[in-house]
């Protein structure tokens, strides 16, 4: 979330049905706009936003797995039934999980029908994201903050990733809830990683990262989520690395990936893990329902695709697919912390890190310089260590991994500490303090020298530090 851009960003794809336009100029006014625009707003009578890339993909593939986002107050069931009548080539894949959108195979006749449907807000590809890893300790002064009493106690961090090793000693007694949103699609040769082999599951065991589908040739494909969760909230024990950023925080683990067995889907090497945007949206809706019950301070997404985006992508229906959910979480004072990506873009980030209401995180190396693999540019909000970070992996083990995936959970943990230290702070206030108290690191981006702050939670949580 760019503080400057948030004050002038377009309020798009909001849960309350805001159409593209200029947001109010204060945080309070932004939240008020998100809560007062209704389906009866005359500005909401336009047709849907259609992703240009979707049109190209349909022309190339005949039909494409797509997300149909509805305007508020509209019936998923009614629109889905009409879509199925639009063409023999259209097929609704999932219409019962969310009141806000559904997933369907869309062909040209169906798309032409959708273009005229004023009940529909946007139509875009249900694209596949990858875990952001380069292949690490944590230099954010967390030990000093922990000694001062700030460990994230009383808060929860939601981790949307590849599940979690449920009985790993690094997480003992602190996994407060689990869920799984993992779709299967024959055309992509993807299969669900939910233990029940269904597209979704909630409750204990739902995010288990040690299911048979996670195993390939004796290796666990689903190690990434445990590693990320450990950086955010691991607690040291015999043989373990030092504490994570917020060792007193609870963990809400959500599996959002599936297993893909098609080399084309995997970019050449199968099997691999991929995550549909629709599953991420369902997971974020689940987080929204759990915010009050678990005092969720941050949600971590160390995943993404595409780019480079050099400015906020809010008006790009495909890239901003999660903006509606990020906006709603922001209104509930939950930070959506997103890894910038590992493409080494000199001046741009991936999606969903490009969304204005994301807290976008780049990675630094062991020398407190920007890591060579890290995406960068004006959309970065914060930096955190991301090279050779040691954390938990399945089978009660530990490993070093690098990537912006490792930087983001350091920041998610920092927001848990900020919630404990400053319970009434908004996300923007916490972010501003983290930026003001962090060590300034300069790097080149777009031919210019740019400065960003690396998180220092000891200074951020200290009453003596001046923001």
Image: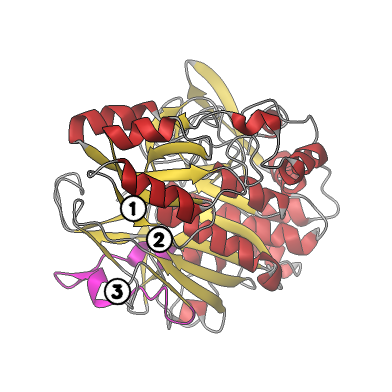
Answer with mark 2 or mark 1, whichever residue precedes in sequence: 1
Rendered position, 302 above or below 195: above
Rendered position, 49 above or below 341: above
Which quadrant would residue 341 be assigned to in this image?
A: top left
Q: Nearer the viewer, residue 434 or 201?
A: 201
Left or right, residue 334 beside residue 47: right
Badge number at residue 197: 3
Write down the residue under mark 1: 92
Q: Identify the residue at horizontal 48%, vertical 77% (top origin).
A: 170
Badge number at residue 53: none
Badge number at residue 256: 2
> Which residues fall within the magenta stretch?
203-227
In what quadrant of the picture does the N terminus appear? top right
Name the spot of residue 410 as percent of width and height, x first. 56, 55
Left or right, residue 428 beside residue 107: right
Which quadrant would residue 116 be assigned to in this image?
A: top left
Name the spot of residue 72 as percent of width and height, x first. 61, 46
């Amino acid at each position: 979330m760019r503080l400057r851009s948030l004050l002038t960003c377009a309020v798009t794809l909001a849960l309350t049905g805001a159409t593209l336009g200029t947001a109010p100029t204060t945080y309070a006014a932004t939240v008020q706009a998100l809560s007062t625009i209704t389906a009866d707003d005359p500005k909401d009578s336009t047709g849907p936003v259609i992703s240009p890339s979707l049109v190209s993909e349909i022309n190339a593939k005949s039909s494409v797995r797509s997300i149909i986002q509805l305007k508020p107050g509209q019936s998923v069931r009614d629109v889905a039934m009409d879509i199925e009548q639009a063409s023999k080539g259209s097929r609704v894949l999932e219409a019962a999980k969310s009141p806000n959108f559904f997933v369907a195979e869309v062909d040209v006749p169906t798309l032409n029908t959708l273009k005229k449907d004023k009940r529909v807000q946007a139509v875009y590809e249900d694209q596949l994201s990858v875990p952001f890893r380069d292949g690490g300790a944590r230099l954010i002064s967390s030990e000093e903050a922990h000694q001062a009493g700030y460990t994230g106690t009383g808060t929860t961090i939601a981790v949307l990733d590849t599940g979690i090793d449920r009985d790993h000693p690094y997480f003992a007694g602190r996994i407060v809830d689990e869920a799984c949103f993992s779709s299967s699609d024959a055309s992509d040769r993807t299969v669900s990683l939910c233990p029940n082999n269904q597209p979704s599951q909630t409750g204990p065991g739902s995010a288990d990262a040690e299911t048979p589908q996670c195993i390939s040739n004796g290796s666990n494909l689903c190690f990434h989520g445990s590693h990320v969760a450990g950086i955010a909230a691991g607690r040291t024990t015999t043989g373990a690395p030092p504490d994570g950023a917020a060792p007193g925080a609870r963990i809400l683990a959500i599996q959002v990936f599936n297993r893909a067995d098609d080399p084309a889907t995997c970019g050449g090497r199968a099997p691999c893990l991929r995550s549909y945007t629709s599953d991420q949206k369902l997971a974020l809706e689940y987080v929204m329902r759990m915010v009050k019950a678990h005092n969720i301070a941050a949600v971590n997404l160390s995943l993404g695709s595409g780019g480079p985006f050099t400015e906020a992508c809010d008006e790009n229906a495909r890239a901003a697919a999660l903006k509606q959910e990020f906006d709603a979480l922001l209104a509930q004072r939950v930070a959506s912390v997103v890894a910038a990506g590992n493409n080494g873009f000199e001046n741009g980030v991936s999606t969903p890190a490009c969304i204005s209401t994301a807290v976008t995180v780049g990675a630094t190396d062991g020398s407190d310089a920007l890591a060579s693999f890290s995406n960068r540019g004006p959309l970065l909000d914060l930096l955190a260590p991301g090279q050779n970070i040691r954390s938990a992996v399945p089978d009660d083990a530990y490993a070093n991994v690098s990537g912006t995936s490792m930087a983001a959970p350091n920041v998610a943990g920092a927001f848990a500490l900020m919630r404990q230290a400053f319970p009434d702070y908004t996300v923007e206030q916490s972010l501003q303090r983290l930026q003001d108290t962090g060590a300034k690191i300069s790097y080149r981006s777009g031919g210019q020298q740019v400065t960003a702050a690396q998180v220092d939670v000891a200074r951020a949580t200290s009453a003596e530090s001046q923001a």
